[in-house]
């Protein structure tokens, strides 16, 4: 661990050594800025994207994380640390396992895989959905699912699956985030059933990359190694002086980059209205558990809506991690059952997209930015972001803040010259 003098001032203090924090820090370095410090409570980098060796092969302890191929700037950035030839590329195969059938994801794009009589039942249900018949879009989550996809998909898949993963009462969820769901029109669905092939938009990770060695966590270890004299582990951040930009009464900053959960910050350092907003933010915890059984499937991961089964997803590492066997399950901690397998609890796994969240996080981020504290990534913005989105946003923020600093320095230099 590097020796960092307390009471030293940095241009940037970055809270959290996950994908967002490490990407931001390394982009600063690429832009010629080296006055920064990264602080993390864990003993190693990566956040939710850390990997451990379990049963002889890497296992991603935060659940399934993969690098999407769609963002060229992100790929170019990541390949500076782990070159292109060190990755395998896959065409995504994901399944939905019902009690009697297993079909490809997304559900509505692959109804054609059911027997004809069941296809007809689903198509009739979709045709009766509110979005097809001109009904106004509802505000409640469950009503929205029925309005968009029809009762049958809602009852067989979407409602039970979301009950399992969120385990929080679906009526508390908003609908503002559902635009991320894959979309297929009734025409697309009918055509796919006739042509017997998928329809609609392509889901995220339609193609993805995964390291040939070391698991996804290898990327973040390499990024951390690149700044190893500017990163501190095993330090829990709980106190931020937002007026003076001091972390834990020890580390001084010109700007703070917040990638850790707002709910971890001591309430005593916050004004009443911001404490109120933070208390509206909710999250879920997930257990990742390893099973050594290698299943007969080509799927990379499988969604499990059956509510009699505790876990909501299976990730088959043997289909993307070279020379690996077994799989891991992901389960909301409110639903976990006792087991004798290796397991890990991720306290902060997913932000909950509750009805109250958008206004709450908007208030927090706006107030903090005015103080020089910038929310970034899944927890800084309290939004479910894939790692490629986190990396892109980190690159963008680093570029913007460094550019602003240079403009301010130029203005100050001009002013000083004029005064001289």
Image (cartoon, rainbow, N blue to C red):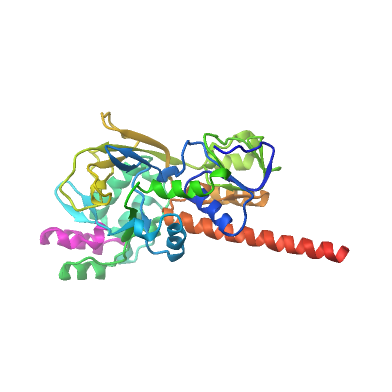
* One can see residue 348 in this view: yes
The magenta span reads: 105-130
Q: Nearer the viewer, residue 130 or 15?
A: 15
Q: Nearer the viewer, residue 272 or 247?
A: 247
Residue 161 position within the rendered picture, expressed as x and y whole percent measured from the top left: 29, 46
The N terminus lies in which quarter of the figure? Answer: top right
Q: Residue at x 59, y 34 (%)?
A: 266
Residue 198, by quadrant, is bottom left
Q: Residue at x 45, y 63 (%)?
A: 76
Residue 44 position within the rendered picture, expressed as x and y whole percent measured from the top left: 46, 39
The C terminus lies in which quarter of the figure? Answer: bottom right
Residue 244, by quadrant, is top right
49 w.r.t. 238: above or below: below
Residue 130, by quadrant, is bottom left
* One can see residue 334 in this view: no
Q: Main secondary structure of the magenta part?
A: helix
Q: Is residue 180 magenta?
A: no
């Amino acid at each position: 661990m590097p020796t960092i003098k307390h009471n030293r001032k940095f241009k940037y203090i970055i809270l959290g050594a996950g994908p967002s924090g490490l990407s931001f820090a390394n982009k600063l370095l690429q832009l010629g800025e080296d006055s920064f410090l990264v602080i993390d409570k864990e003993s190693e980098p990566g956040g939710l994207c850390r990997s451990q060796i379990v049963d002889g092969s890497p296992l991603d302890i935060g659940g399934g994380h993969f690098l999407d191929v769609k963002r060229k700037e992100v790929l170019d950035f990541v390949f500076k640390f782990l070159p292109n030839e060190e990755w395998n590329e896959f065409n995504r195969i994901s399944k939905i396992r019902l009690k009697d059938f297993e079909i490809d994801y997304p559900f509505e794009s692959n109804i054609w895989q059911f027997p004809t009589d069941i296809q007809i039942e689903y198509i009739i249900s979709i045709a009766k959905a509110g979005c097809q018949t001109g009904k106004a879009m509802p505000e409640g989550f469950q009503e929205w699912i029925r309005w968009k996809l029809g009762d049958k998909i809602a009852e067989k898949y979407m409602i039970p699956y979301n009950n399992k993963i969120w385990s929080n009462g679906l009526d508390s969820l908003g609908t503002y985030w559902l635009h991320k769901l894959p979309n297929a029109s009734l025409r697309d669905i009918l055509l796919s059933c006739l042509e017997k092939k998928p329809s609609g938009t392509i889901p995220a990770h339609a193609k993805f990359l995964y390291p040939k060695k070391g698991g996804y966590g290898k990327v973040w270890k390499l990024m951390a190694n690149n700044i190893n004299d500017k990163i501190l582990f095993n330090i829990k951040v709980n106190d931020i002086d937002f007026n003076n930009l001091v972390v834990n009464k020890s580390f001084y900053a010109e700007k703070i980059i917040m990638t850790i959960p707002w709910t971890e910050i001591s309430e005593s350092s916050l004004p009443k209205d911001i404490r109120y907003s933070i208390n509206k933010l909710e999250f879920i915890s997930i257990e990742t558990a390893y099973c050594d059984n290698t299943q007969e499937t080509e799927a990379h991961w499988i969604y499990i809506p059956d509510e009699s089964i505790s876990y909501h997803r299976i990730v088959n590492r043997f289909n993307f991690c070279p020379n690996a066997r077994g799989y891991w399950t992901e389960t909301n901690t409110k639903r976990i059952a006792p087991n004798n397998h290796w397991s890990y609890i991720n306290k902060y796994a997913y932000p909950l997209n509750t009805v109250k969240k958008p206004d709450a996080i908007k208030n927090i981020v706006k107030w903090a930015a005015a103080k020089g504290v910038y929310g970034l990534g899944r927890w800084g913005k309290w939004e479910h972001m894939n790692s490629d989105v986190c990396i892109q946003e980190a690159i963008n923020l680093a570029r913007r803040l460094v550019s602003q600093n240079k403009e301010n320095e130029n203005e100050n230099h001009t002013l000083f010259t004029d005064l001289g």
